[in-house]
Image: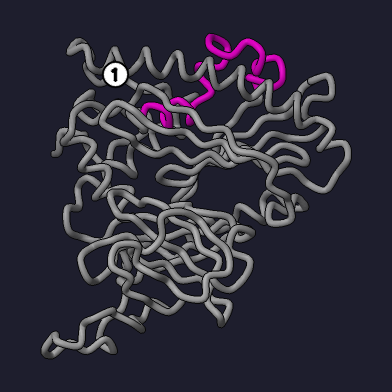
Amino acid sequence: MSEAGNASQTLARARALPASCYVGPEALERDLTQVLGRSWQLVAHERQLAGAGDHVVATVGRTPVLVVRGEDGALRAFANVCRHRAGPIALCDGRGARALHCRYHGWTYDLEGRLRHAPEMAGAEDFNREEISLHRFPAGTWQGLVFVSLAGDVPALEEVYGGIAARIAPIDLAAMEFAHRDTYEVGCNWKVYVDNFLEGYHLPYVHPGLSKVLDYRAYDTELFRWYSLQHSPLRANEGLYGDGEAFYYFVYPNVMLNIMPGRLQVNRILPLGPERCSVEFDYYYADDPAARARMDRDRRFSEEIQQEDIAICEAVQRGLASGHYEAGRLCPRRESGLWHFQQLLREAYSHTTAAAP
């Protein structure tokens, strides 16, 4: 059995991951290679890649990535690493590029990643540019979101996200318009933040405002192969969200979809170090005057909740690093989503070379 624990433990007998999974460089390296490096990673929205030559840059695990819309309309993902001497092909997002030029020595690739020009290489023996292309990765889209995987043997993107769109219908996430992004740096391991998202157990103690909006007694969690869903009826919220239901999806390993009437909030959690992470909040709204009228209040209320979460997550990280924590028992009624995530992590940790989730 690994130090992370038994990958087959039942919810009724479940314990949390040990502190060693949340502190130190070894834990980070394992997450970068076995979890983030072997799963679908959110990198952009299709609207950022609307036309030929539009491109975005991102980092997946430790790998710099470039995603480009080709002349044929296809999306392609490449290592943002020139085949000459590892220079960057792009330094920032861009529009309408006719070719991809290395920023170091000017090697030029077409939008399909094939080398087309290498300055002053005439004297290089056995150099054939026709044999040289940028390293390519799988890319895909779901509901307007763009994903890349460094590994070729991951489950299909449609399988990972399958069933979500049908469940939330008639809400159409792809039709929602981007409004703004808020980014936070949090002093905790990225998994601490995910763990916190995945249980409503802390709502009455950490989020007094949110507890008035959600019905804690009816708050429920459903588990699927690659994602979990927390949902609750919306109580009287003075017009903050309108009428309906709140859906909180977590898709392994680091994407959150917070869906309210007329609004989608996409969270992406990225490690910045063993005990630090970045949390991105992208807000999308339906073409609905009532939903758009709530934008400012929605953002202020989200900020209140986020500051509460940051404070408790950073305190938990200090506890994990203290040397005085042993993996505790989980609450089957309230922490099934957390257990589900940690079981997927245990599964990933147990396969050092085999296919990842």
User: Residue 86: which quarter of the image?
Assistant: bottom left
Residue at the (58%, 74%) spot, across then down: 52
Q: Residue at x 44, y 51 (%)?
A: 225
Q: Is residue 49 magenta?
A: no
Q: Position of residue 140 (x, y in %)?
A: 50, 65
193 or 300, which is in the foreground? 300
Residue 354 as seen in the image, left or right of residue 192: left
- The amino acid type, in three-letter code, at marker 1 is Gly
Depth order, front residue of 205/7? 205
Secondary structure of the residue carrying tag 1 is loop
Q: Which residue is mark 1?
A: 328
* Magenta part, dominant SS: helix
The residue depicted at 42 percent of the width and 67 percent of the height is: 77
98 horizontally vs 345: left or right: right
The quadrant in which the C terminus is found is bottom left
Q: Residues within 10 Å of mark 1 (few under 14, many from 20)?
A: few
Residue 126 percent location from the top left of the image: 13, 90
Q: Which residues are magenta?
A: 192-217
Residue 307 relative to residue 283: left or right: left
Look at the picture and state if 343 lies above or below 237: below
How far across and how far down the image is residue 352, in percent?
17, 53
Percent position of residue 142, x then y: 57, 60
Rendered view: 30 above or below 311: below
Quadrant, the N terminus: top left
Q: Is residue 208 magenta?
A: yes
